[in-house]
Structures are given as C-alpha cells and as structure tokens.
Image (cartoon, coloured by chain):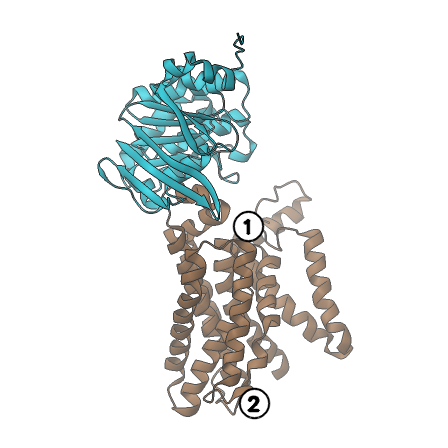
Chain colours: A cyan, B brown
Amino acid sequence: MLKVQNINVYYGRIHALKDLSIDIDQGKIVTIVGANGAGKSTLMWTLAGVLKAKSGTMTFMGKPYPPNAHEAAAKGIVLVPERRRLYANLTVKENLMMGAFLRKDHEGIKKDLYYVYSLFPILKERTNQYAGTLSGGEQQMTAIARGLMSRPKILLLDEPSLGLSPIYTAEVFKTIQEINAQGTTILLAEQNAKKALEIAHSAYVLETGRMVLSGTGKELLSDPRVQEAYLGVRHKTI
Amino acid sequence: MDYILGVIAVICIETIATVGLAVFTGFTGLFSLGHAAFMAIGAYTAAILTYFYNAPFILALIAGMIMSGLISIILGFPTLRAKLRGDYFAIATLGFGEAIRVILENMSITQGARGLPGIKHYTTLPVAIFFAVLVLWLTKNFIWSKYGRNAIAVREDAVAAEMAGIDLFKVRMLSLIYSAMCAGLAGGLFAHYLNFIQPVMFTSILSTRLTSAVVAGGMGSITGPVIAVALFIAVPELLRVANMWRLVAYGLILVLIMIYRPSGIMGYHELSFEAIKNLLRWISRGKTAGRKEM
C-alpha cells in the first residue's frame, strides 16, 4: 500500500534518514521502534509530506506520492503528530470537526463522530470542554479521534503513549487495535517497544537514521539484540 | 473643527491599512514589518495616475490596490513557499519595506526624495469613512468565510492545520494579498488626502505602528485594532501642545496595554452592539453577570 525505497532525508547538512526502505501492507499494524533521535519522527513527517526526501522513491497505493502535506491528507495519509497539537482554545467536538475539514458528506461525518465517541466514550462526556483543559490521555485520544475523522486510509501515529500513565497507555494501544480491526492501516512509531511490538504485524528497528532490523512483531520481540537494546532484558555473556 | 475632522479622516485611512494587516498578522499569525511599503506602492501608483495622467480617482485607487497586490505576490512567493516562520518572515518584510522605499527614492517618475507635491485633494472625510466602513465589512465577511476559518486554524497550529488538509501556502498568500491590497487602498487615499507624498513618509516607523496597532488591539480581532489605531493617532494629536511628550504618550499606551491587557485591547473578541449591551448590563448588575463578551 505504502512503499518507500532508499529515501534520504536531510535537515540542512544533517543526514537524518539514510537509504531507508519500508513497505506497509494494507490493513496491517506496522511498528517502528527506535531510541531518541533515531529518526522515527523524521520518518513520520516525511510520510505525511511535511519533509521531503532528497532521493529515493515513495509510492502510495501504487501511485506517485502526493508532494505536499495537505495533499497527502486529502489522499488519506493522516498523521497524528507527536505531542498531539490540539487546538487548545477549541472544544473537543470542534477539534474533531477540524479532522473532517476536507469532507463534505455531512451524514458520513455524523456517523464517524458517533464511531469515535464509541471508541473513546470519555470524549463524549468532554465534548464541549476546551481541549486545553483535558488530561494528557484524553488529549491523546482527541488527537487520534481527530485523525480518524478524516477517514484515513493509513493513520500515522507518532508516539501515542508519550507522557501517558500505564493505564492510559494500555487503553490507547487497545484502541489502536480496534481501529485497525475496522480496516485502517496503521504505522506506529513508539519508544514503548514492548507494547508496540506486541500489537504489530510487522516491525522495523531504526537506529541513527538506518533501518537495522525488520521482521514480524513476534520475531523482533524474541530477538536478543532488540531485547537488550529496547526491552531491558539482560543476556548473560558467555 | 476642520482639524478634528482631519484627524478622523486620518484615523479612517489608517484603519483601512490596519484592518488589512489584522487579517494577515492577527488571523494568519505572521508578523510584517514592511506594510508601509504596500501603502507607499498604493500611494505612488494612485498619485502618479491622477497627477500625470489625469486618471479618475476611483480607477487610480483600484490600480494602486492591484499594484500592491501584485507586488505582495513577489514578496510572498519565495518567503511563504519557504515557510519562513515568525521572526525570519518579519526580517524579510523589513528588508522588503526598506528596499521599496529606496527604489521609490531613485525612480524618476516618483521624483525621488523630493516627492510628489500638488496631488489633487480627492479624499474628503465622507470618502474616507465610506472606504473604512467598506473595508471593515469586507474583512468581517472574509474572516467569517471558509478562508478566514482556515487562517485562524493556521495561526493556532500550522502543523495541525496542515494535517487536516489546509494548504498553508495558499492561506498565507491569500491573506498577504488581501492585506497588501488594503494597504494599497489606504495609501491611495492617503496621497489624495495630504496632496503630497514623499518616500520618507513610508519608513519602518509606519510599518511598526501598523503592526503594533494590530497586536495592541488584539490578535484575532478586527474592531480591537481599529480602537488601537484611533488611540495611537488621537492621543498624540491631543498632546500636540506638549510637543515633546507626544511620542512618550504613544509608548506609554503600548506599555499600559501590555501590562493590563496582554492579549490586546479586545483579545479575540469583537466590539459589537451585543457586547456593549452585555457590558452595560454587567455594570448595572454590579458584576454578577458574566464578562464573556469583553
């Protein structure tokens, strides 16, 4: 569905992504694991169309990649950015309606509003509250719900567990699986490697801008290198 | 009496430029320190047309607006395409403003630094009021249209707006063109009010005053900047007797606004009949009613 081959992304002279390739199949949850500064967010921004790759090829549904962020959004590639970026001075419902900005089918929007309220019942209670007054977890739910309101084909989630309590984190991951079960492809960038790998169909490990490992979520979970670097498991050296 | 009417006319003219800038700075969130240049372009275009070519006043005004709009595209295309942010964009506009002034000083048709004397006096008080009201009405509709909504979304969070499918470049460009055309109109009226223009009138001091009126009036308000403009012009005029204290008063107003109303005189709100009614009700009830509208 989304194919990226050997892209290179730069910030000025800094080489942030090096010859990176990923392949995302329709209907799957794909996880990118990596430490701080590995390039997870850079990859997300690139896929959302905000950053541009200097070289390499990117295709979406077999067609050339939309060149700009707003065009990517219109094609169904929707990023839920790191740290949520809600409109603090708008209510929860207004934030959600911003997600449906490009849509004109009022019936469909209404239906999707019910759908996201059923996914996140707490948002229904908070519907007229200003987004800036929500707790971190509620804000993250609003951000994901806003992403869903545009009926994305692929949802890019950048660090959805950032700053959340373990309870909220578990809830967010459960919802991600539910969203995926409804047919939305998901690309998940996470530092919480264990949880993210557990729900992933396939996964990649990113290190200083390079893809160093890939496989199914299970394979990576049992890979000693991943366990040592990201899961806190110590392997005895012989 | 003529003097007071004159001050009101100047307020109306600057209101037009400020309201245009309010759309750009207040609603799209980019600061400009060069809008005096757009006033200058509008002023010179209109003045040259009526002065040398005896063009009708209204056509000259429209030509000034169009010229300002076209030149704003030249400024906006590279800067907005590169997504220059905040300070960087402000510096670019500062340079642009100075460049335009130097160009005007060195062209032969503008008669350089000597300026254009003897422009016909077409801008009477009713004309100024008419255009000020027209621009206010247009701007209100612009803000309440989908484009205005887009602009607000961009100001609040450009990234989130982009993720929702808003074309940042288009929104910013449109509001820049709109503000430049308003400034151009104000410039044209200004030239035909003072009957004399020279490049020195359009320095960064004027640009700064326009921008500070928007900020002091409230980013995200249309009526707020209008009040601020009126204050910025009227108070120094009132203090004309105390000559050297006039600029101190201007600075003092700015400082007082920063201390007591940090989000501007009106904040995000508008001054409307509804708001005035609510305020009166609030005063008569003795602070029991909400202060929502103010």
Residue B76 in the image: x percent, y percent? 43, 63
Please state if B31 lies on the left or on the right of A198 as rendered.
right
Tell me the amino acid under the disc marked 2: Arg
- The residue that mark 1 highlights is B268
Tell me the amino acid under the disc marked 1: Tyr
Crowd around label 2: few <14 · some 14–19 · many ≥20 (10 Å): few
Q: Quadrant of residue B163?
A: top left
Where B235 sits versus A80, above or below? below
Q: Is residue A134 visible?
A: yes
At horizontal 37% and vertical 17% (from top left) the residue drawn is A217
In the image, which disc is placed on residue B114? Answer: 2
Name the mark nearer the viewer: 1 or 2: 2
Where A119 sits versus A157, above or below? above
Front residue (pair A206, A1): A206
Front residue (pair A147, A21): A21
Front residue (pair A35, B225): A35
Crowd around label 1: few <14 · some 14–19 · many ≥20 (10 Å): some
Residue B125 in the image: x percent, y percent? 52, 79
Q: Secondary structure at mark 1?
A: loop
Residue B156 in the image: x percent, y percent? 50, 46
Q: Is residue B127 visible?
A: no
